[in-house]
Amino acid sequence: MDNSRNSKLPEKIPTHVAIIMDGNGRWARARGLPRHAGHRAGVDNLRRVIEACTEFGVKYLTVYAFSTENWRRPPAEVRSLMNILEDVIDRELQELHRNGVQLRHLGRLEGLRPMLQRKVRHAIELTKDNQRLVLNIAWNYGGRDEIVHAIRRMLEDGVRPEDVDETLVSSYLYTAGCPDPDLIIRTSGEMRVSNFLIWQGAYAEFYVTPTYWPDFGREELLEALYDYARRERRFGRVPGPLTTG
Ligand code: IPE
Ligand code: IPE
Ligand code: MG
């Protein structure tokens, strides 16, 4: 029996965890495998991390899987990533649905091939009433692109300048209705944001681990949650218990 399953959970669990799933390519190279094998292993790991999030009581999980800048990769790699997304929807959707996972997409859907767009829309529609875990897949997502898109839509809607405030801007982002991330994890040791949730992450806690994404499993996630529970989030205030006024 796996005793780790009995390990105590930290008292403070973040409502929203966001992950920059990085290091698939290096994971593959270290094993003498092609990069796409790393991406496949990354998907297997995502399944484990989704399960762990439901077990730990995380309510929102956002994963960065394909950025607006990832189009700069060789066409064969881009194609293989798109195929992986399509495969994941084909193979995993029913199981995710049964497990109460609500799928959402962050990013520009119009940039994807029509079949993939249809599958993503279908997945969102099928799971829209599920409540156990909201899984945001950031695909063809860029934080700057998201803000540009939000501004365009505000202008199209004829929003008046005096009505623009932070709440309104948030409501025009792809994440509308989701709380801001409490914890942003980046695997593979890179210490940069790479255009991820640049508005929503304004006060997120950061956790960087050298582990490559395919190896970042349940125990490492728990480790990150313990680290988070020890942090003091001050939101600009002085140290001490949170006070109002
Ligand atoms: C993350 O792994 C997955 C995507 C960005 C699609 P990488 O493919 O960036 O892996 P490394 O950083 O080259 O190791
Ligand atoms: C960030 O990883 C994007 C995703 C994980 C999808 P990258 O590997 O693309 O980021 P950079 O290029 O190293 O900043
Ligand atoms: Mg990378």
Image: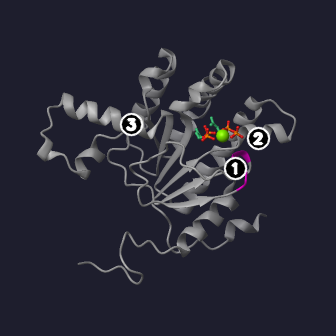
- Mark 3 and mark 1: span between their CA atoms? 25 Å
From the viewer's perspective, is 33 left or right of 165? right
175 above or below 231?
A: above
Instruction: State the residue position of label 2.
Output: 26
Query: Residue at 60% of width from left, 70% of height from top?
Result: 226
Residue type highlighted by circle 3: Glu
Q: Residue furthest bottom?
A: 240
Front residue (pair 112, 150): 150
Quadrant of the rendered image holding ligand 2: top right
- Is residue 77 highlighted in magenta? no
Q: Mark 3 or 1 closer to N-term?
A: 3
* Label 1 residue SS: loop
Q: Are marks 2 and 3 in contact (CB under 8 Å)?
A: no
Q: Main secondary structure of the magenta part?
A: loop
Instruction: State the residue position of label 1.
Output: 188
Q: Are marks 2 and 1 in contact (CB under 8 Å)?
A: yes
